[in-house]
Structures are given as structure tokens and as C-alpha cells.
């Protein structure tokens, strides 16, 4: 029977129920196996979902088997609401609960549901997205993880959590003040001043959304915080950044209302994950050893890295510049100036991820000069570990055409030169035509006319792989950014740093591109990576993506919740899997 239960546990629902029907033992024990895994109740019709009927069987005795429950409805049918009101209070062993019903009036229409969920005493991890947040205040469980999700989805009848003190997360969760370890809030206005409630075990705190949080209540409530995350981007005042850090900090440390007269600091904080603009806006001036800064696509870049480093004094710094032109924002000069400043003097490890986009490639951005300036800045530091990834993603930004022609050099009179070059395996995008092409553009050779367009077709041929004329023509079609990216020698870069920086021990530096030069001799068009020391020994937080081998390895809570455009259902499922794995 143990073998049958093992088979049942790995079978799809229809097969599992068929196995359960074979005998009474499997009918009873099989339900335990199924319900001790993740249980998902979702639907859009009026009918009661099959999973609800499955739990109701055996005189509701199966309710106690449920450990992880995920409920997702846009609007909750009355039949389902009445069924949940019966089965939920009987789930005495429920540990992880995700209640995601995008309907503001849920507990008004079905008032019996709130006491049903609030009666639960065993829940440790709670994710709620409903129109009322009274469940956090009334639930009888002592929570370990709380996730208060946004109600702002541009849907009628929904809105942000009110900014009154009674709806402040610190106030809502006071029943779990002694047990709470992790708090995640999304798009919540927290301008109110809650009563002084201490959460001694909260080590992780994440704020998502476009509101600049008022931090002093959180600093007071979470004195032992270790990991802080703030995603989204703050609004600008009159098109200008928020006031500088020193001014913000003065406002937060001198405000009355009995918080404290001493400077508000997180004495045990180790990491900050989020945008530079948020870190600048909230006015943090105390040290944070590890910074993981992300640039949001479409968000205005605030050149405040030098100022932030001067106050925060990090030991490790990771910055990702993704999905926005690196040369069209003040990111490049801001980064270089910050690395030359005194605020970077304590850095022991640095990780950078830079995507070169179409706007970078088409501009006169000198990639080689950037690497030269970066090298000069790094030689001033006492780095022990370095991880840098730069890639040309311009060709993949808009995949539209299936083929593209090689752009040939032109003569002084504007006429295209006649040449004896034939593209042998891959074609290249014309800058004057469509920006990119699909992967099929590399499937077939594209012949180029020999000695003009009227030449004899018999003279057409395929170039050998080492054709120097073909390589020269391809190179002539590249922009300054592409040429300097191609010419950059990653190995020599690492060697020079090793010779100049006595503390330098480990490094992974990777350059990918240019994407319009996919062939040719040597490593052209592919990832060129240089290693120093054992790259497996690099701290996990340094592994920004290096072609396809390295990814940022952060805490699971950051990885699952900090993606602003991730579908909610996928996010909730991922959260559940993570919580179940952690027990």
C-alpha cells in the first residue's frame, strides 16, 4: 500500500481519484496524501469547485489534512462562500493561507466569512488580497510571515488601504508582535503614526509600490531588521528628485510624537534591495553593508549614487541596469563618479549587470571608453571580488523580420561598393531597415552580388569562414558602440586589475555581443568570459547574470515578490511552494 500511496502522490488529480476508488484504505489515506500538498481552490463560474467537494467528503474529516491553502476568485459565488464558511474553521492544521479575492465588498456581502477565517489558530504564513484587511487584525493565529497585497488594479470599487492609524500594518499585526518574522506590503500608504508596538523578531521587511514610505514607525517597530526591500519608484516633486538625504533624515529624526529623540537607525540591518530613487527618497543615512540596486524600466533615474554611498558606506554593491538605455540616462557618469568617491572606499565586492539596448548601440556611446574609465575607478578600491556582465540585447528588443541584408560600406558618392564578399552562414540587420529579426535569420546563407548587381549568377559563391573581406565589411557596418564592445579584451581587463589591486582575488567578467556580429573568426558575437580564482567561491549575492551561467541568487522572498509585473496567480503559487519547502 505504501507503493500505491507513493504513486498516488505523484499522479494527476484524475488518476489519483481513480486509484482512491480501488479500496477503502486508499480512499481514506489517499485523501491525506493529496491534501497535505498544496490545495488550490479557484474558479470563475457559480459552481462549487471540485476541490471543495473533495474536502467536504467523509463528513468533513478531510479538513484537518489541509496544510497549504490557496484561494483565488475574482468574485466569490455564494455557494462557494457558504462552503468555505463550513470547511475553513475545521482546518486545524492549516499552516499557509493565501486568500486572494479581488472584490472589495467580500466581507460585507458575506459577513459570515470573516469570523470563519479569523477563527484559524494554526496559520503561520498569511497572504491576503481582499477588500478588507480586518482579517490581519482578527485572525487568532500567531503569524510568522504576513503579506498584505495591493488592491489597486484599476478595477471599480477597489482602492488603497486607508492611511489611518488603525490600518497601519504595525497596528494590524499586533496580535503577532512576538512571532512575526517577515512582512511584505504592497501599495500601502503608511503615513499614519501607529502606537509604539515592538516586533522583536521581524528580520525581513519589503515595501512594494509607488508610494514613498514614512520609515520611522517601522524603524521603531522592527528594531532588529536585517533585510529591507523597497521596489517600485517614488513620485517626483515638480519633476525634480526628492530632497537630499540629509534634509530627509532631519525631518525624520526631529519629528515629535514620542517616537524617540535619538537618531532612528536599524542597528542590525545588513541588506537593502530596491531602487536607488527609493533609497534616496526615504533619507536613510545609517550604514547598510550590502546594497542590491535595481533600475526600473521607464522610471526616472536619479543620479544620487554618490550621495547614497557617502551615507550608507556599503561593503558590497550590486547594481543592475536592465531594460533602459544605459547611455541615455545619467547612469554611466553617476556610477563612475560614485566609484571614485569616498563612499565607495569600503567596498570589498562589486557586481554589475549592464544591458546595451538599441538606443545605446545606435548612439555614439563609446563602450571601450566606459570600460577604461571603470578600470581606473576600480583600481582605486580595495576589492577582493568582482562580477560584471555586459551584453548587447539590441537585436532581441524588437524581433520582427525573418531575414536581413548585410549593409555594405559606401563610396564617397553614396553608391554602394562592389565587392567580392558573400555571406556564408549568417545575415546581418540593416540599420536603415527593421531593427532585428527572428532566429530564423541565421538559417540560410544570403548571397551578395559579386562585381555589381548585373554580375553573372555563376560567380556567386559562399565565403570561407575565415574570409577577411567578409569580416571587414561586417565590421564597417557596426556602430561605435558595437565596435568598441567587440574590441574589448576581458582577459586583459582582469589581468590589469589583478596586477594593480593587491586585494583582488576572485572575478568573473563577461561581455556578450555585439549581437549584429553573430559569426566570424574567434570569439566574435559570443560571450567572452574571464575568470580569476574559483568563481564557484564567489558569494551568491554577486552572481549577476553572466551570459547564461550566472544569476543573482537572492533570498526566495525577494525573488518571488519583487517582480512588479508578475501575474498575481503565479506569484501566489510561487509563494506557496516556497513556504511549503521551508516547512
Image (cartoon, rainbow, N blue to C red):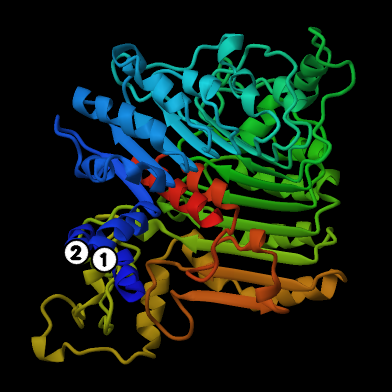
- Quick check: 560 left or right of 255? left
Q: Is residue 201 above or below residue 547?
A: above
Residue at 70% in and 25% down: 218
* In this picture, residue 281 sits left or right of residue 378: left
Q: Is residue 51 above or below residue 166?
A: below
Disc tally is 2
Using the rendered image of the protein, determine whether residue 238 is visible from the camera's viewpoint.
Answer: yes
Toward which corner of the image does residue 249 lie, by quadrant? top right
Taking depth in this image into account, of 200 and 424 the one nearest to the observer is 200
Q: Secondary structure at mark 1?
A: loop
Provide the residue designation for mark 1: 11
Could you tell me which residue is drawn at 69 percent across and 30 percent down? 280
**Disc 2 to disc 1: CB gap under 8 Å:** yes
Q: Which residue is mark 2?
A: 15
- Image point 10% across, 78% down: which residue? 454
Residue at 23% from the left image edge and 68% from the top image edge: 405
Amino acid at each position: 500500500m505504501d507503493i500505491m500511496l507513493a504513486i498516488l502522490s505523484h499522479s494527476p488529480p484524475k488518476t489519483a481519484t481513480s486509484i482512491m476508488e480501488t479500496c477503502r484504505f486508499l480512499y481514506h489515506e489517499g485523501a491525506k496524501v493529496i491534501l497535505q500538498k498544496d490545495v488550490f481552490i479557484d474558479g470563475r463560474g457559480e459552481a462549487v469547485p471540485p476541490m471543495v467537494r473533495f474536502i467536504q467528503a467523509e463528513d468533513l474529516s478531510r479538513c484537518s489534512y489541509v496544510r497549504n491553502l490557496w484561494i483565488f476568485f475574482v468574485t466569490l459565488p455564494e455557494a462557494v462562500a457558504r462552503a468555505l464558511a463550513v470547511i475553513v474553521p475545521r482546518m486545524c492544521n492549516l499552516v499557509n493561507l493565501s486568500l486572494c479575492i479581488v472584490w472589495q465588498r467580500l466581507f460585507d456581502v458575506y459577513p459570515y466569512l470573516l469570523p470563519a477565517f479569523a477563527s484559524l489558530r494554526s496559520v503561520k504564513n498569511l497572504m491576503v488580497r481582499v477588500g478588507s484587511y480586518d482579517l490581519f487584525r482578527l485572525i487568532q493565529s500567531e503569524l510568522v510571515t504576513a503579506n498584505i497585497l495591493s488592491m489597486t488594479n484599476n478595477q471599480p470599487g477597489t482602492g488603497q488601504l486607508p492611511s489611518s492609524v488603525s490600518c497601519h500594518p504595525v497596528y494590524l499585526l499586533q496580535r503577532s508582535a512576538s512571532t512575526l518574522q517577515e512582512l511584505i506590503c504592497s501599495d500601502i500608504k503608511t503615513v499614519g503614526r501607529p502606537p509604539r508596538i515592538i516586533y522583536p523578531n521581524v528580520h525581513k521587511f519589503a515595501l512594494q509600490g509607488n508610494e514613498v514610505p514614512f520609515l520611522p514607525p517601522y524603524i521603531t517597530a522592527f528594531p532588529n531588521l536585517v533585510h529591507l526591500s523597497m521596489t517600485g519608484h517614488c513620485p517626483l516633486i515638480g519633476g525634480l528628485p526628492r530632497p537630499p538625504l540629509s534634509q530627509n533624515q532631519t525631518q525624520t529624526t526631529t519629528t515629535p510624537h514620542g517616537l524617540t529623540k535619538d537618531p532612528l537607525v536599524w542597528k542590525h540591518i545588513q541588506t537593502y534591495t530596491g531602487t536607488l530613487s527609493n533609497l534616496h527618497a526615504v533619507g536613510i543615512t545609517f550604514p547598510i553593508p550590502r546594497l542590491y540596486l535595481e533600475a526600473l524600466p521607464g522610471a526616472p533615474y536619479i543620479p544620487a549614487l554618490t550621495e547614497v554611498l557617502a551615507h550608507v558606506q556599503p561593503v558590497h554593491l550590486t547594481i543592475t541596469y536592465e531594460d533602459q538605455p544605459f547611455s541615455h540616462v545619467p547612469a554611466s557618469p553617476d556610477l563612475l563618479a560614485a566609484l571614485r568617491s569616498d563612499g565607495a572606499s569600503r567596498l570589498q565586492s562589486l557586481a554589475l549587470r549592464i544591458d546595451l539596448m538599441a538606443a545605446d548601440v545606435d548612439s555614439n556611446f563609446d563602450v571601450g571608453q566606459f570600460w577604461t574609465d571603470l578600470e581606473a575607478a576600480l583600481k582605486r578600491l580595495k576589492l577582493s571580488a568582482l562580477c560584471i556582465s555586459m551584453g548587447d540585447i539590441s537585436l532581441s528588443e524588437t524581433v520582427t523580420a525573418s531575414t536581413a541584408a548585410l549593409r555594405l560600406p559606401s563610396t564617397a558618392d553614396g553608391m554602394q561598393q562592389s565587392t567580392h564578399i558573400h555571406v556564408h552562414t549568417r545575415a546581418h540587420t540593416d540599420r536603415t531597415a527593421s531593427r532585428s529579426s527572428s532566429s530564423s535569420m541565421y538559417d540560410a546563407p544570403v548571397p551578395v552580388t559579386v562585381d555589381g548587381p548585373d554580375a553573372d549568377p555563376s560567380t556567386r559563391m559562399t565565403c570561407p569562414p575565415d574570409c577577411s573581406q567578409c569580416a571587414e565589411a561586417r565590421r564597417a557596418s557596426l556602430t561605435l558602440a558595437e565596435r568598441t564592445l567587440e574590441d574589448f579584451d576581458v582577459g586583459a581587463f582582469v589581468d590589469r586589475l589583478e596586477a594593480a589591486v593587491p586585494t583582488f582575488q576572485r572575478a568573473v567578467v563577461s561581455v556578450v555581443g555585439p549581437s549584429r556580429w553573430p559569426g566570424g573568426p574567434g570569439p566574435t558575437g559570443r560571450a567572452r568570459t574571464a575568470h580569476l580564482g574559483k568563481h564557484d567561491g564567489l558569494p551568491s549575492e554577486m552572481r549577476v547574470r553572466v551570459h547564461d551561467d550566472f544569476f543573482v541568487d537572492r533570498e526566495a522572498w525577494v525573488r518571488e515578490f519583487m517582480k512588479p509585473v508578475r501575474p498575481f496567480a503565479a506569484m501566489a503559487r510561487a509563494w506557496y511552494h516556497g513556504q511549503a519547502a521551508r516547512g
